[in-house]
Structures are given as C-alpha cells and as structure tokens.
Amino acid sequence: MTTAALRRIIADAAPAPAPANPGSRGVATVGRHLASIHARWLAEVSRNLLPACSPRAGFWPRWTAVRYLADRFDRDYGLEGELLDGLLDEVEPRAAERLTDGRRALEILRQDLDWIGRRRGTGIATAAVAGAFLQTLRRWCADLERALWSLQVEEVRPQTAELLARLELIAEVRGRPESQATTPGAGTARGPDRA
C-alpha cells in the first residue's frame, strides 16, 4: 500500500459531519463534544490499524494492531459504551437499535481481529477484518454523534457528564505529539529510539 493511499484512508477516517442545526450554534451538546473526541480517536485507531489493513502486512504490523486494541482501544471503547448505556433512553428508538447493532458488530469484529491477527500467515484475513472493523467503527461513531447531536450537556446525568469529561481529557492527551506513537520510535524512519 502506498503512502498516498494510506493518507487517503486516514483522511476518510474522519466521522461524517453531524447534521447542521443553525438554531443551536454555540450550544454545548453531547454530539458536538463527541465529534471532536471521535476525530482524534479515529485518527489514532487508523494510525495503529491501517498497516494491518494491507494483505501484505507481516506478522509484526498485525501484532501491533492487536496489541493497540487490547492496550488502548478497549479502554476508550469501554468508556464510549458506558456513555451510550447512560444515554440510550435519550435516543430515538431506531437510532438506539442502529447503535446497539453497530456495537454488537464491533465487538464481533474486535474478537475476530484479535484471534486472526495473532497468527502467522493470516495477512489477507487480517486485512479484511481490520478494514471492516475500521469502517464499522467510523459508522458507529457518526451514528452516535448524530443521535446525540441536539442533547445539551447540561441535560445529562452527572455520571454521564463525568464520562464525557473523561473522554475529552483522553482526547486532549491523544492530540499531544508525544502520544502519537504507541511504541518508541514507531513514528520515525530510523526505527526504535536509542537512549
């Protein structure tokens, strides 16, 4: 996969814009907060999973993707799940069903990716599952933002507001240059950092 192709895929990882509502400009809504959080989260997930999306990826890029999912992704996804659980009664029934179905699909793909990505000689299968996982995650994030776009932050329960604040804090840290690589030297052409 070429560098240009990888950049195009990363650019496509941004969530679909939530619906514009001219009457709510400047109002703090859960959906607006999630759009900002998801933009950073999806960029990080893409950086860590895209190398495994190539059928030619060797064992180590696949292993790195699996480790990222276990080490960092699961924490954030767990918080997103808690947030959704706390707000599901605020979401219209069809959107709630889409979000629940998307969540199930993500969990199945996550388990499949963990199982396949740990084995040698599974480049094509890993690439397919990793690509499906990324697409499903992007769609789920965009659906969650749309479902909560008009819900004002002041209207949510304190526990839900605390979860949203934790996700924002994680997103702020994620945006710092020192947090961009999950392994030392991963972002350099030289290889591992030497102390």
Image (cartoon, rainbow, N blue to C red):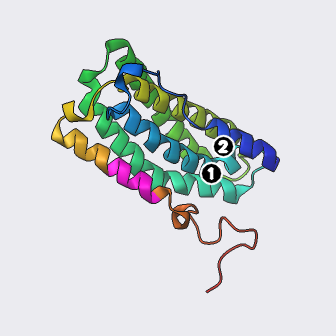
Q: Is residue 191 above or below residue 38?
A: below
Q: Quadrant of residue 189?
A: bottom right
- Residue in the foreground of this view, choosing between 153 and 194: 153
Q: Mark 1: which amino acid?
A: Arg
27 to the left or right of 183: left
Asked if the residue at tag 1 contacts the one at tag 2, i.e. Cβ–Cβ closer than 8 Å, the answer is: yes
Secondary structure, mark 1, is: helix
Q: Residue at x 74, y 55 (%)?
A: 58
Q: Is residue 144 above or below residue 188?
A: above
Q: Which mark is residue 137?
A: none
Residue 183 visible in the displayed image: yes
- Residue in the foreground of this view, choosing between 181 and 73: 181
Residue 71 visible in the displayed image: no
- Residue in the foreground of this view, choosing between 47 and 34: 34
Location of residue 126 in the rendering, given as x and y in whole percent from the top left corner: 67, 42
Residue indicated by mark 2: 10
Q: Is residue 183 above or below residue 69?
A: below
Q: Residue at x 38, y 39 (%)?
A: 33
Q: Residues within 10 Å of mark 2 (few under 14, many from 20)?
A: some
Q: Quadrant of residue 90?
A: top left
State the extent of the magenta-drawn residues as a range. 166-173
Q: Mark 2: which amino acid?
A: Ile
Task: Give the overall secondary structure of the magenta segment.
Answer: helix
Secondary structure, mark 2, is: helix
Q: Is residue 21 above or below residue 128?
A: above
Residue indicated by mark 1: 47
Q: Residues within 10 Å of mark 1 (few under 14, many from 20)?
A: many
Location of residue 28 in the rendering, given as x and y in whole percent from the top left corner: 32, 35
